[in-house]
Amino acid sequence: MRSDSIVFAVAGMCFGVILGWVIGVQQAGPQPPAALTAAAPASEGTGTGQQALPLDEARVQSLMTVIKNDPENAGAAVQLANTYFDAEQYADAITWYEESLRLDPSNPDASTDLGVSYYYLELTDRALEQFEVSLKLDPDHTKTMLNQGIVLAFGRQDLAGAQAAWQRVVALAPDSPEGQAASRALEGITAAGHGAAGPGG
C-alpha cells in the first residue's frame, strides 16, 4: 500500500473517532473552544469540518477597545485571536496569537493555537516549529502532542512521527481525552496496515 493511501485510510478511521479533538481543540483563554468537532486535515481542503461561526464583530470591537486602553493585555489579545479563529479567519488569528505571545511568551496554549492556525493556512513547517516551542514551554503538554501527531500524519505523511507523538500522549495521560484520542488514532494506524509499536514504546 502506498504511503498516501495509508494516510487517507487513517484519515477515515482516525478522524471519525477523534471527535471533539479537531486540530484546533486547544483554545487559550477562559472560553471553551468552539471547534469541538471531528475534522479532516486542512491539507485536504476541508477546513475544520464544521460551519465557521460568523465573526462576532461586537466582541472584536470590545476587545480592540480593551487592547487600545491596555496594550500590554496579553489575555485580551488571546481572546481576540480566539474570536478570529472561531470564525476561521486564521490570518487575523495568527496576528493576535503572535501579539499575545510577544506580551506573554510563556503561554503554551496560545503557542499551540498559533501552530494550529499556521497549519490551517497550509504552513505545515511553521506549525510543527511552533509546536516545538509549545513543548519547550511545557514538555508534557499533551494537547500539543496530539495536534503535532495530526499535523505529522496529514501535513507530512509522517506516520512514524505521528505514532511517536501519540504514544507520548498515551504514556503521559492514558485516561485523559487526549490520551483516549491518541490511543484510537494509533489503533487506526494499525488497522490501516501500518504496524504500530505499543503505546508508550
Image (cartoon, rainbow, N blue to C red):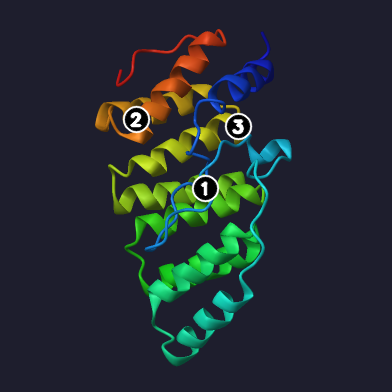
| Crowding at mark 1 (Cα within 10 Å: few <14, some 14-19, many 20+) | many
Query: What's under tag 1, amino acid-wise?
Result: Gly
- Quarter location, residue 13: top right
Give how far across and how far down residue 23 sits, in percent: 52, 42
In terms of depth relative to the viewer, which is nearer, 77 or 4? 77
Q: Secondary structure at mark 1?
A: loop
Q: Which residue is mark 2?
A: 179
Q: Secondary structure at mark 3?
A: helix
Q: Which mark is residue 108?
A: none
Q: Which residue is mark 3?
A: 154
Q: Which residue is mark 1?
A: 24
The image shows residue 105, relative to residue 26, as above or below, that is below
Query: What's under tag 3, amino acid-wise?
Result: Phe
Quadrant the N terminus occupies:
top right
**Mark 2 to mark 3: distance in Å?**
19 Å
Quadrant the C terminus occupies:
top left
Give how far across and how far down residue 57 sits, in percent: 63, 75
**Mark 3 to mark 1: distance in Å?**
14 Å
Give how far across and how far down residue 102 sits, in percent: 42, 72
Q: Disc 3 or 1, which lies upstream in sequence?
A: 1
Q: Secondary structure at mark 2?
A: helix
In terms of depth relative to the viewer, which is nearer, 49 or 117? 49
**Mark 1 to mark 2: distance in Å?**
16 Å
